[in-house]
Amino acid sequence: MRLEDFDFHLPEGLIATRPARPRSAARLLLAQGDVIRDLHVADLAELLGPGDLLVLNDTKVIPARLTGTRRRATPQGDAVAKVEITLLEPAADGWNALAKPLRKLKQGEVIRFSDALSAEVAEIGEAGLRLRFDTTGEAFDAALAQVGAMPLPPYIAALRAPDEADRTDYQTVWARHSGAVAAPTASLHFDEPLLAALRARGVRFAHVTLHVGAGTFLPVKVEDVTTHKMHGEWGEVTAEAAAAINAARAAGGRVIPVGTTALRLIESAATPEGLVRPFRDVTEIFIYPGYRFRVTDALMTNFHLPKSTLLMLVSALMGQDRIRSIYRHAVESGYRFFSYGDASLLIPSRE
């Protein structure tokens, strides 16, 4: 299975830099078996009904982009230099992060972000560093909220800088547990009116937590995709969520993750027989064609990057040829791609 098998042409003009307003006004491509329909996310309440269970990722994106200063020695004396930091994931003692410029930093020096937040460079590696902040817990969260910016994906950040609107736009309406540095983007299409309409239809919800890491944007660099190693992400399926998923399956309902993050987590928590157990661990699950899904009946997801692991995941669910035709239709029909783009509801044919 070659990397080029997951390539397609995407015009740059289809990369969304702002979300639809209201959220549920985004377009929705319904692919059910061999049928494609062009709808809107607000139509979701007419497509789902009693017995269906939506699995929602309630991770909360932190404002992980920071600009700080460091003092550096010059022949004329100490000078202040700017440092750009992107937090990646919590570590045992601090945070793993990227820095620009990395090569000028030295272990032990301090980067100051504000009067309420600074960090010591605890360790420097080839690709990044570990920072030890001077505060933790709620005080850290409050200081980060004051000085941090939302970590927009590289393909959006290359087109515009993050701004105040992204603090709301790049966060789900049910975000609860802080720790992600990227949003579960299919969930960004939901607003309170849509949730109310779904409840009125008898649709149920189960909340799980997967802290999406920056590794979700890492390119696949191997030609044989089966040898690719996934980044690890921490997740939790509570006993309550596991019971809700198992109950829906036992009653013959459909289990529909909203987003690839929720899908990867519940598949990690499931036994080969399809029983979901409580899970609290790091998952490195890599889903590509040939994977046998354990609990997922359908998937709501945005449109993904060429040659990405997420494109491989949806190809595993729908079939490679089917995904090629779905994406061809999406491009020809002007669907907006990636994190702030439109959505798809993928329902594979039942065997």
Image (tube, rainbow, N blue to C red):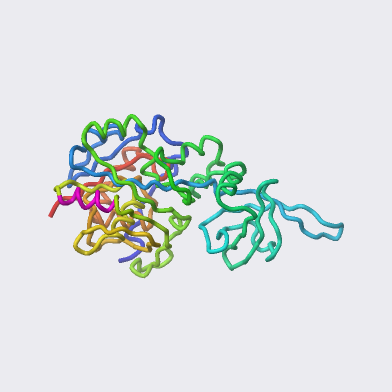
Q: Is residue 148 among what the camera can see?
A: yes
Considering every residue shown, the one lying at the far left of the view is 351
Classified by dominant secondary structure, the portion drawn in magenta counts as helix
Q: In the rendered view, tell whether residue 3 sits above or below residue 114.
A: below
At 39% from the left and 30% from the top, the residue drawn is 22
Residue found at the very far right of the displayed protein: 76
- Residue in the picture at 40% in, 33% down: 20
Residue 120: where, in percent of width, then height? 66, 59
Q: Nearer the viewer, residue 157 or 65?
A: 65
Is 179 placed left or right of 307 in the picture?
Answer: right
Residue 110 among those drawn in magenta: no
| Nearest to the observer: residue 31 or residue 86 | 86
Q: Is residue 244 magenta?
A: yes
Horizontal relation, residue 155 to residue 204: left or right: right
In the displayed structure image, the side of residue 155 where residue 188 appears, left or right: left
Task: Tell which of 286 and 179 is nearer to you.
Answer: 179
Extent of the magenta region? 241-250
Instruction: Give the quadrant of residue 205.
Output: top left
The quadrant of the picture occupied by the C terminus is: bottom left
The image shows residue 257 at horizontal and vertical percentages of 29, 48
Q: Residue at x 34, y 43 (%)?
A: 331
User: Residue 228 vs residue 139: left or right?
Assistant: left
Q: Is residue 134 above or below residue 16?
A: below
Can you give x and y, in whole percent of width and height, for residue 242 in the image? 27, 53
